[in-house]
Each structure stands twice: as C-alpha cells, then as structure tokens.
Image (tube, coloured by chain):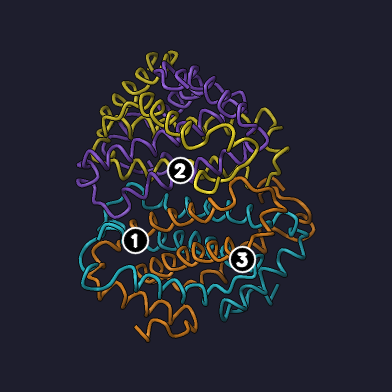
Chain colours: A yellow, B purple, C cyan, D orange
C-alpha cells in the first residue's frame, strides 16, 4: 500500500504496478485485450463528458476542481492503455515513435500548415 | 525529421516532440482541450474496432500484422492523451499515481478479489 | 409535462418533442452538431460500461434492474442521435435504408456467412 | 434484395430487417449485446470524427458530400442501436419516452434555462 502511494517514475514502473494490482485481485481473467479496449473507451467518454458542452476557449479555462477531475479521467485512460499494451506486449513509447515518423510523412509541414484536413485531403 | 525518427525516451520527451509537431504546422488553434478529448475518443474507437467481434481468447492471439495495427492505434491514443495533458498542464504520471492510490482504497483486495463488480457494488 | 409523459409514437414525434425540450430551455446554442456528436458518444460509453467486463453469454442475461439501466442509456443514445439528425436535416430512417442497401452489397450472403471479417477482407 | 431497397417505414420494420440480415449471414453468434454495444461506440467515433476539428458554426455548415457521409455514420449508429435493443428485448421508443419524462424532472425549465450544467449542479 505504501508502495502504491510512492511516485510513479515512468511507464515501465506503471506497467509493473498495474500488473501487480490486477494479480492481487485475480483480475487477469477480466483483463483480455478486448475488455481493456472497451474499458479504455468508456474512460475516454468520461473524459470527453467534461468538455461536451464547452466552447474551445472555455475548455482551456477549467476550475481547479474540474481540472483535477479531468486529470483523474486522463489517468484512467492511461492506466487502461498501459495495461492493454502490457497484455499485448506492445512497447508504447516505441509505438509512439513509429507513429510520429508516420505522421511526419503524412503531414508534411508545407501542406499541413494551418489546416485540419486529413492527410488524404491535403 | 531525423530528430523525429529518434527514439522517444519518456513521456516528457514525447510531450516536447508533440508540441513542436503542432507548432510547426500552426495546429495550436485546433488543439483545444475539447478537440483533443474528441480526437482521443475517436482513436479509442479505432482501437476497439480491432476487437469488436472477437471473443476474449481470440483477442489475445493477434496476427503480427493485426498487432502492429493495434499498436499504431494505441500510439494514437497516447499521442492525444499526452497532448491534452500538456494543454491542461497535467502531469500524467503524477495523476496516474494519485489514481492508483484511489483505486487501492476503492478496491481493497479482500473485497475485490475475483469479481468485476464496481466499487459501489462490492 | 403531461404531454411529455405521453407515449412517443415514432421518430418524427420524438424529433418534435426534443426540439421543444431544447427550445424551452434555450439550449439551441449548445446543440451544435459537433456538441451533439460528442454527447452521443459519451452516452454510448455509458451504455458500453454495463458490458465491459461481461462475457458474451452473461451480456444476454441481465437482471431486470440492469436491463432498465441499459434501456435508459440506449434511450440517451437515441435522443442525441435524433437531435443531431434534426440539426443536420437528416432523415434517419431514409439514411438507414440507404445504409442497408450498401451493406447488402458489401456483405453478400455467400461471402459473409459465418464470418466477422470486414468487407475488404472477405 | 429489392426488399432491402424498399423504404424503411419505422423502427419495428428496421428491427425485422436487421434480424433477417443477421440471420441470413449466420451472424447471431457475433451479435451478443456486448459486441453490439462495442460496435455502436465504434460507429459513434466515426460519426464524431467528422466534427472533431470543427468549430460550432462550421459543424452546422457541412458540404452535401460531408453531410451524406455523416448521414451514413448516423445510420450505422441507429442500426446497431436497434439491433442491440432487439437482442435485449428493449422497446426503444418506450424507453425514450421514459427518459424524456426523467429529463423533464431533472431539468425543470426555470433552473435549466440557458445553462449547460448537469442536473446535479443546477
């Protein structure tokens, strides 16, 4: 428990903690990739709920209470994402690096500047 | 570009890269927290799509091609999550640590073992 | 109010009621298509939450209480869908008819029988 | 097929058509409530994708091509919603009527006018 309150140092540390958290509770049978992907989007919905009626400017000016609630929903998304990646043996940072390289090709600066169009409409 | 292909070392590094990626393309006006929360759930849907018709066992046995596609969708979720946290000045690992502590209280091992019930139904 | 408790007869009737509901509360400014699409997916997440840890068989055997909660979330999805269609002047039943015809072409019985593969993988 | 191209007259008609569509393809085993709820949110994500970078005003001024694509995504949401309701024996219009009555109580006009706050914050 004191262990769980200690600072999370990085994604690997978080992975190990979540694995232990699930194992202690015999939750592995529930943590199939498909269930984790479902749980992730449910949390993404709770995150979006905070913003659904806000204009763009309002959505940047949250009260401290709202911001903390948003932080907890963002954390939930991260927890399920890390857990899902662990179950599928995906290295999230390496995958993010590959995706960044793909995005840099799909959205070259001269074409993508100032537009929100999708790469196939640039 | 060679910079973008270099290894992503941690979430802070990813944050800085995404900030530069958006700035170079003048995308900040589109990257309001509410838009990023919407983009995140859209990617979470693309992630879930890979699993929607699979049983629990099947969802753990992906082909290498499918697994890489799943990894790219998981990366997209991470990219938007990191970007959203940056825009709201949320420290994701610290938030994850706080959430882990909350979950440890909500789901004590003796009550939560082997059940998928929500904390308010334990 | 007694009006609102009367039976909803069809989608047109529901459209008219929702329009009045929003107008009485001056909610039109919030009901942009983008906000309604966000609200819809938030409700779809609340719907999915009921099923996220359930196996396929379990998900068909809900208690009456759970089933009513699911029905209320399904209703929320319908309300936002009907409201969104109204704002964009989309005839939902006509659109559903067009989509059925497209699906019948994409998934011919001989190819699609017994498989959950996507049309581009048949 | 000519049957499938005929006009969809109401939700009951749509229910019967979708049931036949699935039966002809032996898709019932895939159509568990949990899978249908997952498929529904995936489509809700594809619907939201059209709006994710748009401002409120822009989201009301779609080109005819974009509007038709949005209509097809909205239709997909409706198809899965109707199919899910059928599998759980939920009467969608009756559920919508019950939800409208609940919303009328949660959001009384004098309190709810002109605000997007949630009922528990009114």
Q: Is residue C42 left or right of residue D56?
A: left
Q: Are marks 3 and 2 in contact (CB under 8 Å)?
A: no
- In the image, residue D97 above or below residue A70: below
Residue name at image x 36 percent, y 27 percent: A92
Q: Quadrant of the N terminus of chain A?
A: top left
Question: Residue A24, how many percent across, how many down?
Answer: 27, 27
Q: Is disc 2 placed on a helix, strand or loop?
A: helix
User: How far, Cα to Cα, is label 1 from label 3?
Assistant: 34 Å
Q: Which tag, 1 or 3, sits closer to the chain's start?
A: 1
Question: Residue D83, how many percent across, how many down?
Answer: 38, 69
Which of C5 and B28 lies nearest the eye of the viewer?
Answer: B28
Residue that label 3 marks: D64
Q: Write down the quadrant of residue C100 in the picture.
A: bottom left
Question: Residue C14, how many percent across, how many down?
Answer: 61, 74
Q: Are marks 1 and 3 in contact (CB under 8 Å)?
A: no
Q: Quadrant of the C terminus of chain A?
A: top right
Question: Label 1 is found on which chain of the structure?
Answer: D
Q: Is disc 1 placed on a helix, strand or loop?
A: helix
Question: Label 3 is found on which chain of the structure?
Answer: D
Residue that label 1 marks: D33
Question: Label 2 is found on which chain of the structure?
Answer: B
Q: Is disc 3 placed on a helix, strand or loop?
A: helix
User: How far, Cα to Cα, is label 3 from label 2?
Assistant: 25 Å
Q: Write down the quadrant of residue D43 in the picture.
A: bottom left
Discs 1, 2: same chain: no
- In the image, residue A92 above or below residue C65: above
Which of B103 and B96 lies nearest the eye of the viewer?
Answer: B96
Few, some or many C-alpha atoms within 10 Å of disc 1 (few <14, some 14-19, many ≥20)? many
Q: Write down the quadrant of residue D112 in the picture.
A: bottom right
Residue that label 2 marks: B43
Disc number placed over residue C61 in the picture, else none: none
């Amino acid at each position: 428990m004191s262990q769980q309150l200690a600072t999370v140092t990085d994604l690997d540390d978080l992975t190990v903690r979540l694995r232990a958290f699930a194992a202690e509770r015999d939750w592995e049978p529930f943590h199939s990739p498909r269930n984790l992907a479902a749980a992730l989007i449910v949390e993404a919905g709770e995150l979006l709920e905070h913003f659904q009626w806000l204009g763009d400017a309002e959505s940047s000016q949250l009260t401290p209470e709202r911001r903390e609630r948003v932080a907890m929903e963002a954390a939930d998304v991260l927890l399920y994402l890390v857990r899902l990646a662990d179950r599928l043996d995906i290295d999230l940072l390496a995958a993010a690096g590959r995706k960044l390289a793909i995005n840099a090709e799909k959205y070259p600066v001269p074409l993508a500047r100032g537009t929100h169009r999708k790469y196939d409409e640039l």
